[in-house]
Amino acid sequence: AAKESGRSTFCVYQPEMRLEAERRHLLTAELRDALAKNQFELFYQPIMQLADNTLSGFEALIRWRHPQRGLVAPLEFIPIAEETGLIVPIGEWVLREACRAAASWPPHLKIAVNLSVCQFRHTSLLSSVVSALDEKGLQPHRLEIEITESVFLADVEQSLPLLKALKELGVRIAIDDFGTGYSSFSYLRAFAFDKIKLDRSFVAGIETDPGNLAIVRAVVGIGSGFNATTLAEGIETEGQLQKLRDEGFGEVQGYLLGKPQPLSYAEALIYGGGQGWGDAPATAGERM
Ligand code: C2E
Ligand code: MG
Ligand code: MG
Ligand code: MG
């Protein structure tokens, strides 16, 4: 990871993501253009609370509607946006757009937004969050910020006070992709996360792999010990859903419950007759 604290360029420089100079140059110009031309879009993936099978909110996931290439997935442009610092204005757009959408929903529904480690290097993060909430009229506890352990790896002295300040605002903080990368128990002790999102790689084999089941049980224990909600990502089968329910997980998210979809589909799920999950347009519409 880069050491130039406070600098936005080469923020999470990773050699394997390095594109050849020319392509990178073009993509950077295109990304800048995309922001100006409003080509970014948020898709929303539903999150279900297991205790009562109700919708607890959505995770906002960015898409780039490219005029020629169509819908572009975040992993194809977020790394370069991080490398060039463009993630900061893009991230600010995401925050405002997610808060705008959620402010019109029933007040029990939350919105989860992914933040890049680069945004933590920028002193403007706290004020960006405050102004997005104020401007859109969203109560802080309805916003959940998802971070990965890279935030701790990069610069703890700067990240930890920022996380604490966000929490003091009333914003909820989730650790994403838990169990992968360098995530470690010490981060759980260092910061009081409101939610632990178990990475989908541990969910995949849960029905057959005793090791994955042991991990799931350990995470349930950690969640209750640290007073954090537990969420399992990437639920694709009824069997996985049942298992996680049996083990006492708090929330689930995955293609079984609903893929990330445009705002209109999220709103159809929210307002669709109020009969609950069964009426979700789970197979309708544009997806990715
Ligand atoms: P993430 O935050 O861990 O998001 C979950 C990813 O898993 C999403 O991919 C989602 O579509 C996918 N997913 C959800 N359920 C299932 C399932 O049942 N099976 C499978 N196979 N996949 C599932 P997506 O939308 O392509 O996003 C990838 C990553 O890009 C995200 O991972 C997040 O790290 C990043 N990202 C997305 N939106 C933003 C954003 O607005 N800002 C930043 N900084 N990063 C973002
Ligand atoms: Mg996430
Ligand atoms: Mg995740
Ligand atoms: Mg992930």
Image: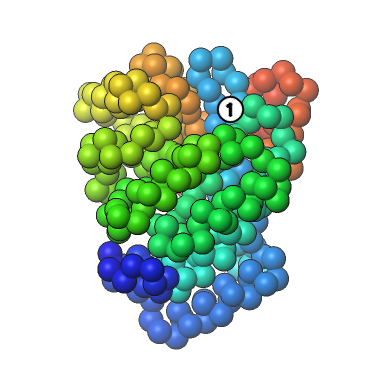
In the image, what residue occupies the spot 42% across and 50% down? 162
| Residue closest to the eye, 233 or 119 | 119
Note whether 168 is above or below 26 in the view shown: above
- Residue 137 location in percent, x, y? 71, 43
Q: How has the structure been colored for display? A: rainbow
Note whether 138 is above or below 76 in the view shown: above
- Extreme residue in the bottom direction: 22
Label total for image: 1
Residue type, mark 1 in image: Ser
- Could you say whether the residue bearing mark 1 is in a helix, strand or loop? strand
The image quarter containing residue 80 is bottom left
**Which residue is under mark 1?**
56
Q: Is residue 220 left or right of residue 99?
A: left
**Image quarter of the N terminus:** bottom left
- Residue 260 location in percent, x, y? 58, 43
In the image, what residue occupies the spot 59% across and 35% down? 142
Query: Can residue 75 be seen in this snapshot?
Result: no
In the image, what residue occupies the spot 52% across and 81% down? 26
In the image, what residue occupies the spot 42% across and 57% down? 120
Note whether 22 is above or below 130 in the view shown: below
Q: Is residue 288 left or right of residue 138?
A: left
- Residue 218 location in percent, x, y? 26, 24
The image quarter containing residue 138 is top right
- Residue 31 location in percent, x, y? 57, 72
| Residue closest to the eye, 121 or 235 | 121
| Residue closest to the eye, 282 or 220 | 220
Q: Is residue 2 left or right of residue 266?
A: left
Q: Is residue 15 left or right of residue 118?
A: left
